[in-house]
Amino acid sequence: MQIGNHILKNNLVVAPMAGVTDRPFRQLCKKLGAGLAVSEMVTSNSLLYGSEKTLRRANHEGEVDPISVQIAGADPKMMAEAAKHNVDNGAQIIDINMGCPAKKICNVMAGSALLKDEPLVAQILKAVVGAVDVPVTLKIRTGWDKNNRNAIEIAKMAQDIGVQALAMHGRTRACLYMGDAEYDTIAAVKQSINIPLIANGDITTPEKAKHVLDYTGADAVMIGRAAQGRPWIFREIEHYLKTGEHMLPPTVEEIHTVMLEHLHDLYSFYGDLAGMRVARKHISWYTKGLAGSASFRHNMNTLQTIELQLNAINDFFAELKSKNERLVYVDTATEGSEALAA
Ligand SMILES: Cc1cc2nc3c(=O)[nH]c(=O)nc-3n(C[C@H](O)[C@H](O)[C@H](O)COP(=O)(O)O)c2cc1C
């Protein structure tokens, strides 16, 4: 898998997720097998470049190459400026967000709302591709709604303008996250373009990743929600694609170790108080389905210092380890469906 001059170590991509794919999470996923991780979206509004949130999102210190930064906005000039600004700050790939259905984004006609206005899409793509020397990628949905699936037109246009890879979520803007992602439109787009296509939506297991790759002919798969609390999903998929066999799921001991490393990274990235708060949702994801985790997670949200947070985690895992338990994924497609088997 190659994007511009960047040869990726595999075809497994971490989806951009605002509030989730910060630098610590991207680093962790890359360490555990992902070939590429796209940043949380960064605003194209230059007035916000100096804000704490935007500065943090633009911090790539120590990040494994290639560094892909997603920008969001609807004004071609501002998007071009934002692309340049982020390249000056370390971005090696610029990704354009035309896939996010969030109201906050679509109300200003950015994200997936842009799919409704093809001439504006063309202007934005031309402006961004013309502004930077690094590869530009685009993330879209299948269209605006089920009657307006214009992904093929957008994909061809993007390729002609010089976009170097396309990520596609198999839902329309109107679908939000409802129903199942569909892969027929992704397969049809693959038939119409030559640039690498990254398929996205509801990929939760190694089998599903293989199915989507085979069914769509896509060059790569992108995984979002299934990596929350399960960053090792990338090595599990890589192993399955290579061998046709499943890796053993991580031991409780390893989950504990990975989680502690992740939390310490969050504390140093965000600072103690903010880091402790950001850590809560990750702790909840990591422990979902583990024996006794419901009351553990409930209690976690009442703890107000790093020390208390870490003590509670260490006690919880000590109890699990004393029972010699191992995490077994029964059906990861259904939230909270993991079960513990002795
Ligand atoms: C919490 C959250 C935040 C997201 N933020 C972004 C974003 O900033 N930019 C974007 O293009 N997509 C965003 N998405 C969409 C994901 O990149 C992805 O397309 C979607 O979750 C479907 O993939 P999945 O089924 O593997 O989760 C977000 C999704 C979630 C769940």
Image (cartoon, helix red, strand yellow):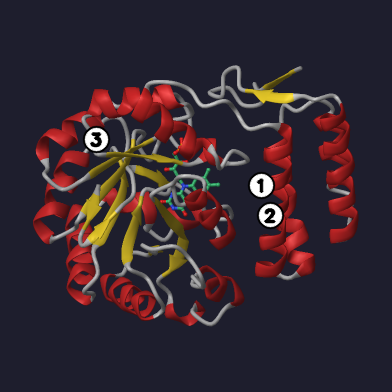
Residue 258 is marked as 1
Q: Which residue is mark 2?
A: 261
Residue at 81% across, 31% down:
293
Instruction: Give the image location of residue 97, x and y in percent.
Output: 36, 56
**Lower position in the chain sequence, tag 3 or tag 2:** 3
Q: Quadrant of residue 120?
A: bottom left
* Numbered badge on residue 218: 3
- Looking at the image, residue 22 sits to the left or right of residue 159; the answer is right
Q: Amino acid at mark 3?
A: Ala
Judging from the image, what secondary structure is the residue with disc 1 in? helix
User: How many other residues sit within 10 Å of disc 1, few (<14), some (14-19) or many (≥20)?
Assistant: some
Task: Say which residue appears at 33% left-offset and 59% top-offset.
Answer: 95
> In the depicted view, which residue is nearer to us: 134 or 158?
134
Question: Residue 208, percent across and down?
Answer: 40, 24
Report if residue 181 is visible in the image: no
Q: CA distance from mark 3 to mark 1?
A: 31 Å
The answer to which quarter of the image holds residue 192 is top left
Task: Find the distance from the CA under tag 2 to the CA under tag 1.
Answer: 5 Å
> Which kind of residue does numbered mark 1 sit on?
Val
At 33% from the left and 49% from the top, the residue drawn is: 9
Image quadrant holding the C terminus, namely top right
In the picture shown, does residue 36 fall above or below 211? below
Residue 200's x, y, as percent? 37, 37
